[in-house]
Image: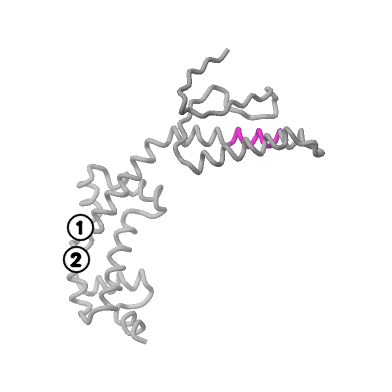
Amino acid sequence: MHRFDLKPSVFGTILEVQDLPELEMPDQAVHLRVRDAMEQAKFVALVENLQKEVNSKAPFADRACLYHVGLIGVWLDRASVGQADGQSKNASRELVRKYMQNVESDFATGKIIQDYAEELGVTTTHLTRCCRNCLGQSALSLLNQRILQEARNLLIRTTLSGKDIARMLGFSSAAYFTRAFQHEVGVSPKTFRNNSKS
């Protein structure tokens, strides 16, 4: 028995599937709130493709229906996992967003990852894990990339010396700046500047 009390603005789909052992459907009822329009569209497309096969008189339509229902089961499992992980993913994305904002405003101050993590009220390990999960890179790598992006801009657009650029970007010495730049870019700051002019 089912009972649904729906308001006029509510739209939904009920899909009844025969219990077949070869189908891997969720074991328990799942209440999903799918807000992502792309995910909603994927689900609707799966159901519509199933409906086409149900109405089809094409050869092997039964087998095609079975596979379409299997894909719907996969979508339900993914959506269930995604919803369970959703809150932590949103928190991770928000943390990374704040971190990147702080990096953008403070990258030239000489702050280290511990300083950023402390400001955000998390450990450096947690911050790095969130950055890796959301952007595929460590927090340190993201900070270094932003600093060296600015170094490239300054080398191309100004006549400042390497020593001045190192000081502006919070490096402890010009030699350390040169080593870090060469490690990341593959050439020394001087060579980079000369190559950008040609």
Viewer-closest of 52 and 109: 52
Image position, residue 171 (x, y; %): 21, 67
Residue at image position (64%, 37%) is 48
* Quadrant of the snapshot with the C terminus: bottom left
Q: Is residue 126 above or below residue 32?
A: below
Q: Out of 126 and 147, give the one closest to the viewer.
A: 147
Q: Using the image, determine if residue 52 lies above or below residue 175.
A: above
Rendering quarter of residue 23: top right
Query: Residue at 19% across / 61% down in the picture?
Result: 110
The residue that disc 2 covers is 170
Secondary structure type for disc 2: loop
Q: Is residue 4 left or right of residue 61?
A: left
Rendered image: mark on residue 111? 1
Magenta residue span:
66-74
Residue at 82%, 39% (x, y): give it.
59
Q: Is residue 70 magenta?
A: yes
Q: Position of residue 112 (x, y in %)?
A: 23, 56
Provide residue 127's location: percent of width, then percent of height.
31, 47
Q: Is residue 106 left or right of residue 68?
A: left
Task: Find the residue positioned furthest to the right.
Answer: 59
Q: Is residue 1 left or right of residue 110?
A: right
Residue occupying the far bottom of the picture: 198
Residue 70, quarter of picture: top right
Whole-Å distance between the Cαs marked 1 and 2?
A: 8 Å
The crowding category of the residue bearing disc 1, from other C-alpha atoms within 10 Å (few below 14, some 14 to 19, many at least 20), is: some
Circles 1, 2 touching at the beta carbon (< 8 Å): yes
Q: Secondary structure at mark 1?
A: loop
At label 1, the amino acid type is Lys
Q: Does residue 181 sit above or below 45 in this rendering?
A: below
Tell me the crowding category of disc 2: few under 14, some 14 to 19, or many 20 or more residues within 10 angstroms, Cα based.
some
